[in-house]
Amino acid sequence: MKKFEISKWAAVMLITASLGLTGCASTAPSGISLPLHQAWFNDQVIYYVTTDVSDQEMARAMGVNYAPRLRDAIPNYPKPPRQKTVIERVYAFPNGEQRNIFPSAPTPVGSESTDVAYSPVWLMYAVKWIEPKHAIELTSEDALLDAEAKGWVNIERTNIVVNCPIVPSTYVSH
């Protein structure tokens, strides 16, 4: 008997085509809608979606999946800034003073990214202004860490892990 070999991609295409021909794929939704959020990365506005949160109250408030196992990604030590692991810091402003700050992003966003540090799994750090009346817009991790060094903000690690993939700006309808 002669062996027939097929590449993984060819197999996927064959299965997809056969599902389409048999009507099995017709029960799938034609699209979904997720809230698109803006954040800062290196002085640039980026866009992301949130799909899962390890904190049930936060997940409920955001209308996303509660995923307590995301906490398993938290290292056993306080993760220093700029040390890359599967989990990355995201800086959130619980009082809503400004957009979140991401310390990494796919560059460029999409399938051609060359950024090996990017991960869509984030450990939330809460940022609070020591003197809220002096708050300014911080647009990068460097600016935020500088503000912390100057005593302007307090950064506190939480145990909340979020899955927030950064998406191309082409997802934004104008």
Image: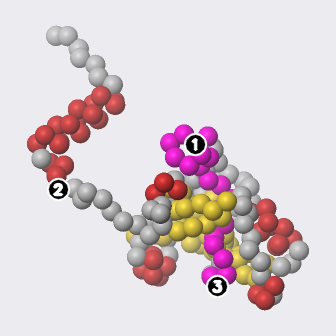
- Looking at the picture, which amino acid does disc 1 mark? Ser
Q: Which residues are magenta?
A: 95-114
> Label 3 near label 1: C-beta < 8 Å?
no
- Distance between mark 1 and mark 3 Cα atoms: 33 Å
Task: Please tell me whether residue 96 belongs to the stretch shown in magenta.
Answer: yes
Furthest residue toward left: 22
At 33% from the left edge and 25% from the top edge, which residue is drawn? 7
User: What is the quadrant of residue 46 in the picture?
Assistant: bottom right
Lower position in the chain sequence, tag 3 or tag 2: 2
In the structure shown, which secondary structural element does the residue marked by tag 2 occupy? helix
- Distance between mark 2 and mark 1 Cα atoms: 33 Å
- Looking at the picture, which amino acid does disc 3 mark? Asn
Q: Pick whichever, 138 or 7, lies toward us.
A: 138
Give the position of the N terminus as an image quadrant: top left
In the structure shown, which secondary structural element does the residue marked by tag 3 occupy? loop
Furthest residue toward top: 1
**Residue 115, image x and y in percent?**
63, 44
Q: Which residue is mark 1?
A: 113
| Residue 75 seen | no
In the displayed structure image, the side of residue 58 where residue 29 appears, left or right: left
Q: Which residue is mark 3?
A: 95
